[in-house]
Image (spheres, rainbow, N blue to C red):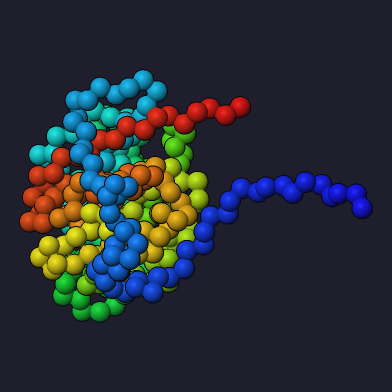
Amino acid sequence: PTPGPPAVRSAPVPTAVEVDEYSTNPTQAFTFYNINQGRFQPPHVHMVDPMPHDTPKPPGYTRFVCISDTHSRTDSIQMPYGDVFIHAGDFTELGLPSEVKKFNDWLGTLPYDIKIVIAGNHELTFDQEFMADLIKQDFYYFPSASKLKPENYENVQSLLTNCIYLQDSDVTVRGFKIYGSPWQPWYYGWGFNLPRGQALLDKWNQIPDNTDILVTHCPPLGFLDWVPKKMQRVGCMELLNTVQRRVQPKLHVFGHIHEGYGMMTDGTTTFVNASACTVNFLPMNAPIVFDLPNPGRTT
C-alpha cells in the first residue's frame, strides 16, 4: 500500500479553562496549589523591583505607564515619561459624572501618545445593570449614586474623551493587542461584581488568545492579592488559570487590592498591581513603568 501524506502538525490548541474545584475559596486554593504543585514558588515565581522612572528607554521599545485606583486623588501624583498610559480602574469614588469629568480633564493634561482606561468596582455608573437595580430600591450604601437619573449616567462613558475606554474589548496600539475588563469577584455589592466560578470564567473566556497586554481591575489568585488585615488571598482562580494556561500575555496590569501594590513574574507574564492609593486611600504609590520590545513587523 502506498503511504499516505505525512501528518501535518497543527499548532498546539490552548487549554480550555474550567471552573476550579477551589474556586470559591481562594486562600485554600493558594495553599493547596502551593504545597502540592509549588505553583507560586521561586525560582519561576518571584517579586520584581519596579524600574526607576528615569531609566533610559532602549531603542525599539515601548514604555507603558501603569496606574490604578486613583479614586479622584490625582492632584499630587507625579507622572513619569512614557508612551502608553494604562489605568486599571477605580479612577473615581462612585462613578459620579462630575468625578468622571474631573478624571477626563486630568487625562487631557497627560502627554502620552495613547491612554487606555478600564472601569473598576467604584465606577458604579459604568455598570448599567447595577444602576438599574440601584435606582429601584432605597439603597443607603450609595445615596449620591442612587439619586442619579438614567439620563445622567446612561452615557457616562462618553465623558471619557481623552482616552480609549475598554470594557470586555480590545485595541491594538503600536502592534500590541491590549484587552480590558472591569469584572471582579463579588465584594459587598459594588459595580461589576460577579460570583466566583462560572460567571467570571464566562467573562475571562472572552479574552483573545493572542492578547499581549491584559488589563483587569482584579488580580489573579496568588499574585499581589494578599489582604493582611483579613489574612486572605482574594484574587480570582479562573483569571489565574486563564492567564497562565491559555492567554499567557506579556503583561497583566490590575489594581483593586491596594495592599498588593508591586510587581511579580511567573517567567512568562509580568504581573503589575498598580494601585496608586494605599489601604487608607492615600495616593502614595508611584506609577509603575514597564518597557516591552516593539512587535516585529511581519510582511
Would you identify the image quadrant in which residue 59 lies? top left
Q: Can residue 216 be seen in this view?
A: yes
- Residue 277, given in percent of the width and then of the height, sits at 13, 50
Identify the residue shown where x is 32% and y is 32%. 291
Q: Quadrant of the C terminus?
A: top right
Residue 42 place in picture, x, y as percent:
27, 50
Position of residue 152 relative to residue 287, above or below, is below
Out of 57 and 283, give the one closest to the viewer.
57
Q: Nearer the viewer, residue 95 or 98?
A: 95
* Residue 150 in the figure: left or right of residue 140: right
Q: Which residue is drawn at 50% across and 28% down?
A: 296
Q: Which of 204 and 281 is in front in this view?
A: 204
Nearer-the-camera pick, 43 or 157: 43
Is 265 placed left or right of 92 in the picture?
A: right
Q: Position of residue 83 (x, y in %)?
A: 32, 30
Q: Measured along the vertical axis of the image, is residue 286 above or below residue 90?
A: above
Residue placed furthest toward the front: 1
The residue positioned farthest toward the bottom in the image shown: 137
Number of labels in the image equals 0
Query: Where is residue 81 drawn, in percent x and y?
Result: 24, 28
Residue 23 location, quadrant: bottom left
Q: Residue at x 25, y 35 (%)?
A: 289
Q: Is residue 74 above or below residue 218?
A: above
> Which residue is at a point 52% across and 59% down the rendered structure image?
15
Is residue 156 among the parts visible in the rendering?
no
